[in-house]
Image (tube, rainbow, N blue to C red):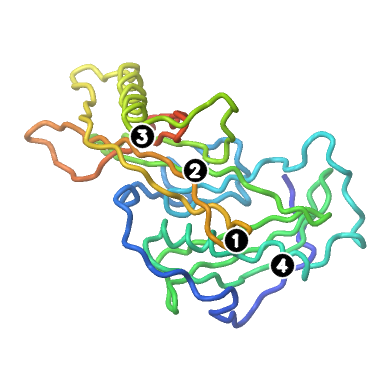
Amino acid sequence: MRKIVLLTLFLAVAAPSAWGDPDEEQPPHPLLDSGEFSYGSDPNLFDLVPDADPETSFDIGHVIFAYPVPYRNAGDPPPVPLESVVPVAQVMKLVAPDKALKALVNQQLHYNHAFHLEQVELVSLKQIGYRWQVVWTLDLSPGGGSGVPFRYRALVSDRGKVIQPDLYIYDAYSLSDWRERLCSNLQLNVKPRPEQKKLTQQQIEKRGRKALEKFLRKVKVTPGKKPVRFEFLNCRSLALPMSVGADGEVKSLTVWGVNFKEVREADAEQTEELFTVWVSEYGAVSELKLFSREW
């Protein structure tokens, strides 16, 4: 997809309090201690979400923000001419980070971060029309670098509709053979069917254990090597901040992490890292994949 940049605005100085003070810091959640990867790693988020737009999608902590390609659906209104594109001032009001988004970022990165406006651009996409893209850098609050150049991107259509990304929560685990990477990936913003009921912790644990056992049975074992083995450790819930309600309170989405520890040979390097199979409250289980590096 070819992109033509029509307008780019840079802020030389971004006020740290542009969007208000971050929420009070919380201790890191045990389910979010490991498994992060960044753009260019092996595997990367586009291995887990192949349909994600590589120009705009990104991950923060264990959450993937995957924008679709293309973002217009059948039946959507046609693109508007350049002179009718929604103005940038309205765009900034639509995508101003709220306290739910800041709470999610802080949760995933373990420390409070501030949003600093980096770039606003109006782009033209062939046969799709114009689209606004707003980019923030995330820096440790009250100042200083985060150590990793995390960025958050928001997209708005030419008519002023916020383009929502698909959200996923993943885990990435290096097996004892360093060339192999085991991943789990669960889509978050999927509405349950009316007949679906929330499961108990025991039911969720059972689904997570069954999913991993079934997956490992299908993994091909190299001749001369022993199959990968995991033992169940625990099952814990995680509340992900998702939105702000009419009462101003943050609304969260609860997911469950079914955690496993790899059983390694006594003479192999041991690790305290866990592998998490994510399960929704309604029983949807994360997709499991095994990636192998070949040098």
Tag 1 or tag 3, which sits nearer the N-term? 1
Circle 1 sits on which residue? 247
N-terminal of the pair, mark 1 or mark 4, is 4
Residue at 27% from the left image edge and 39% from the top image edge: 178
Name the image quarter holding residue 154.
bottom right
Kind of residue sitting beneath label 1: Asp
Q: Nearer the viewer, mark 1 or mark 4?
A: 1
Give the labeled residue for mark 2: 45
Task: Say which quadrant the C terminus sits in.
Answer: top left
Where 12 falls versus 123 (above or below)? below
Mark carried by residue 277: 3
In terms of secondary structure, where does tag 3 sit? Answer: strand
Would residue 233 be found to the left or right of residue 60 on screen?
left
Nearest to the observer: residue 45 or residue 191: 191
Q: Which residue position is annotated with label 4?
A: 93
Label 3 and label 1: CA atoms lie apart by 34 Å
* Amino acid type for the residue under numbered disc 3: Val
Of badges 2 and 1, nearer the viewer stands 1
- N-terminal of the pair, mark 2 or mark 1, is 2
Quadrant of residue 265 within the rendered picture: top left
